[in-house]
Image: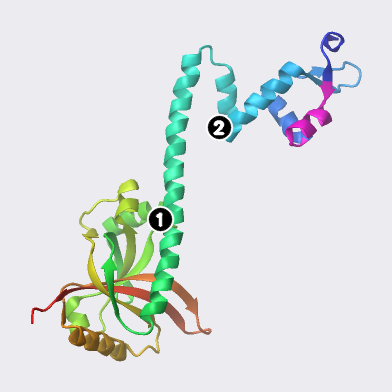
């Protein structure tokens, strides 16, 4: 047996060294990634130092995100150039994954920031800025919009459901006249949308960054909307402002109050300009 020339180790020793299970080592064998020595009578498996090093190298590629079948192909490549091509592609994949992870972290961070801002706005309207946004409307008042283009765009957006935020919008006219009409949709900040390939089209609107009145609004069946709109109108008058566009909100929290009443908390941006005195 070759073990007489080179020291060999049992599968349990290998598993302990690598911090994996013996079953994982056996799976490597089933996939054809390693070829242990077998004792004819007992069928016990043994591994020498070359196979151990091969396993260590194999695990590195697993950490890179390769599947076992892909690693098997890599191990069978004849030249370093072949492996280089594969690694260059994997490098770009990891860069994209890292960027996407950063977008997810940013999504969480901005939601936390919006909640903190909402606490300030609870006491009354404040002045701030609306970020640059892409917006997809899928609901008008209490009905879904039956449009194939919207449905196709929704599928595209929801591939990354953790990145868009839900958003209500009320027209400038409705804000000024306290009408009940509104629409609902999704928003993505500009940087995230452009990374995901979202562009302005027939159903996706782009809203540039702008100064905005910020207010906190809790919507439910029992919300006094007239009172909330009056608070906005009073603030506009006191600050000598003019509303110049539709409101856009960010849903920052939603929950059931009881079995029949649903509450949605909005951070609302309303574009404004100062009126010359």
- The majority secondary structure of the magenta stretch comes to helix
Residue segment shown in magenta: 9-21
Query: For residue 110, which quarter of the picture?
Result: bottom left
21 versus 34 height, above or below: below
The residue beneath circle 1 is: 158
Residue 213: x %, y % from top left = 26, 76
- Which residue is painted at 35% across and 57% down in the image? 154
- Which residue is painted at 90% across and 21% down in the image? 42
Q: Is residue 8 left or right of residue 64?
A: right
- Who comes first in sequence, dot 1 or dot 2? 2
- Which residue is painted at 27% across and 68% down in the image? 129
Q: Is residue 15 left or right of residue 108?
A: right
Q: How is the image coloured?
A: rainbow
The question of residue 71 being in magenta is answered with no
The residue beneath circle 2 is: 66
The question of residue 20 being in magenta is answered with yes
Residue 66: x %, y % from top left = 55, 32
């Amino acid at each position: 047996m070759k073990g007489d020339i080179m020291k060999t180790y049992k599968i349990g020793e290998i598993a302990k060294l690598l911090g994996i299970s013996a079953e994982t080592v056996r799976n490597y064998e089933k996939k054809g990634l390693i070829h242990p020595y077998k004792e004819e009578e007992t069928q016990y498996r043994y591994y020498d130092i070359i196979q151990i090093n091969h396993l260590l190298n194999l695990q590195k590629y697993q950490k890179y995100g390769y599947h076992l079948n892909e690693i098997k192909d890599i191990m069978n490549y004849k030249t370093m150039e072949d492996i280089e091509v594969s690694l260059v592609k994997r490098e770009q994949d990891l860069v994209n994954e890292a960027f996407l992870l950063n977008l997810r972290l940013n999504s969480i961070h901005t939601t936390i920031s919006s909640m903190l801002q909402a606490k300030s706005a609870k006491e009354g309207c404040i002045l701030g800025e609306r970020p640059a946004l892409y917006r997809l409307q899928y609901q008008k008042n209490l009905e879904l919009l039956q449009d194939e283009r919207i449905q196709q765009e929704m599928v595209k957006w929801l591939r990354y459901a953790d990145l868009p935020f839900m958003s209500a919008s009320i027209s400038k006219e409705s804000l000024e006249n306290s009408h009940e009409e509104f629409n609902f949709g999704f928003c993505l900040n500009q940087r995230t949308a452009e990374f995901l390939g979202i562009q302005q089209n027939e159903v996706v609107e782009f809203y540039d960054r702008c100064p905005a009145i910020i207010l906190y609004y809790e919507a439910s069946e029992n919300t006094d909307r007239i009172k909330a709109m009056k608070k906005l109108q009073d603030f506009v008058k006191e600050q000598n402002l003019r509303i110049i566009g539709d409101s856009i909100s960010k849903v920052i929290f939603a929950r059931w109050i009881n079995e029949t009443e649903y509450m949605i908390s909005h951070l609302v941006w309303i574009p404004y300009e100062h009126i010359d005195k």
